[in-house]
Image (cartoon, grey):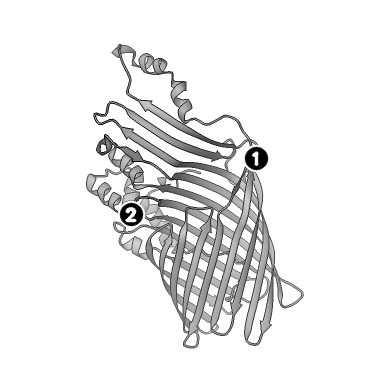
Amino acid sequence: MTCPLNKTYKFYRLIAAWLCFVSISGYSQQYYCENIDNSYYLSLNSILEFNADGPTNYFAASFYKGRFLDNTMKTEALNRLRPNNNMLAYLFNTDIYLNIPGKKNNINYYAGFENHNLMELSFNKNFFHLFFFGNKTFTGQSLSLDDLSYTTLNFQQLKAGISKTWQKNDASYILTAGVGFNNGQNLMKYEVPYGALFTQQNAEYLDLDMTIGMKRSDTTRAGFGAENGWGFSADVAYVFRDENNIITCQVEDLGFIRWKKNSQSYSKDTLVHFDGFEISNLFDIDGETIRGISADSLINEFAFSKTQAGFSDMIPMRIFISYKRYLFKRWLSLTCSFNSYVFSVYRPQLCLTGSLNIPVKNSVVSISPSFVTGGYGRFNCGLGVSAAVDKKFYIELQTSYINSYFFPKKSAGLGGYISIIKTL
């Protein structure tokens, strides 16, 4: 997958304004939806997100557009970072689902398709300092480069499942379960669990010591739908609902992809001592440097085995819990949610959303400000607008990055979420 930020910052702002995107991961509509009739319906959901918990929008845009980064900008970005586990991530997921009512009123079936695109980068403060300022300030000491990782993952899913509803008094209980077939398009994963760089006091030599792990799928075929791996996944969700309360518990994408035999998986320890090049003939630098030190010997310190073999890797598994409370005859609602991903660098995310629900004839229009912390970022404020029309049509547009759009030099985040549901 090519780097998503090679496009201009203005282009991303245009997309964000167009869709009013959100960082709160909307979930697929194979699960219970309170805004539509229990009948045949199609749903389309899409989420685009770029976020970072250190570099701001202004810094990230300046870097990828090739602008000059002065020391003030770089220092401000450095001071925002944690010592470890800083993140930068991009995702773009889209799904389409068909809901099929069963012969019994309390049974529903669903079938759908999902497309997932993910990039994650995790790094420590030392790595950022080394990349943007060099190693001059670290002479005579060992610089820790632990816990670095870079992952790109693209895969598709075909899913199907069933939901059953129980009624007791004035409450509803809904249990949903489903399975999915995973098609692995491409994977590239690099991990440095341990790394150390030592610069001699007078900069006469460098010592680089690190443990490197690599996993990647077949690189000759990486386009949309490429069949480089396969696997299975499972989903389960539980919903409790009464007149004024909705509780949702969900586990999604508990599964794996078995990447095929043309893939590579490798781990090695590397120790490199570099004390420069000795040049005796200025008119034959290429001969002195390349043939003299043997390029292959240097490349082999970092290159991976050419042996190809299949391997299995887990896909990010989502855990989602939310509680929604209606107040003042449903004119107002408050929602508190917890969102997390396992097998990902994503941090647990907490979100608080308030909604003003305005009846308009046979419709309800909702305006929903939100406050989000965690995930790939730190803290963001958002705004969403939705409309449910006569239980036949539903549309929702959200963004969790209002503060990032207005204050790009102080915060990070671009992207959002759109959902459209229509009965058939």
Is residue 68 in sight in this rendering?
yes
Mark 2 surroundings: few (<14), some (14-19) or many (≥20) residues within 10 A: many
- Point out the frontmost of discs 1 and 2: 1
Q: What percent of the width, then of the height, locates residue 294?
A: 43, 18
Please name the residue shown 55% across and 40% down the image: 215
Secondary element at tag 1: loop
Residue under pointer 1: 260
Q: Amino acid at mark 1?
A: Lys
- Is residue 106 rendered to the left or right of residue 302? right
* Nearer-the-camera pick, 263 or 91: 263
* Nearer-the-camera pick, 103 or 359: 103
How many numbered callouts?
2
Please name the residue shown 31% across and 15% down the image: 279
Secondary element at tag 2: loop
Q: What percent of the width, then of the height, locates residue 15?
A: 43, 57
Decide: marks 1, 2 in contact (CB < 8 A)?
no
Q: CA distance from mark 1 to mark 2?
A: 38 Å
Q: What percent of the width, then of the height, locates residue 181?
A: 67, 53
Is residue 65 in sight in this rendering?
no
Residue under pointer 2: 56
Q: Amino acid at mark 2?
A: Thr
| Vertical position of residue 58 compared to residue 424: above or below | above
Tell which residue pokes out farthest to the front in this image. Answer: 141
| Vertical position of residue 90 compared to residue 102: above or below | above
Q: Earlier in the sequence, mark 1 or mark 2?
A: 2
- Is residue 77 rendered to the left or right of residue 354? left
Mark 1 surroundings: few (<14), some (14-19) or many (≥20) residues within 10 A: some
Residue 318, quarter of the rendered image: bottom right
- Is residue 64 rendered to the left or right of residue 313? left
* Nearer-the-camera pick, 115 or 268: 268
If the image is split into quadrants, where does the C terminus sit? bottom right
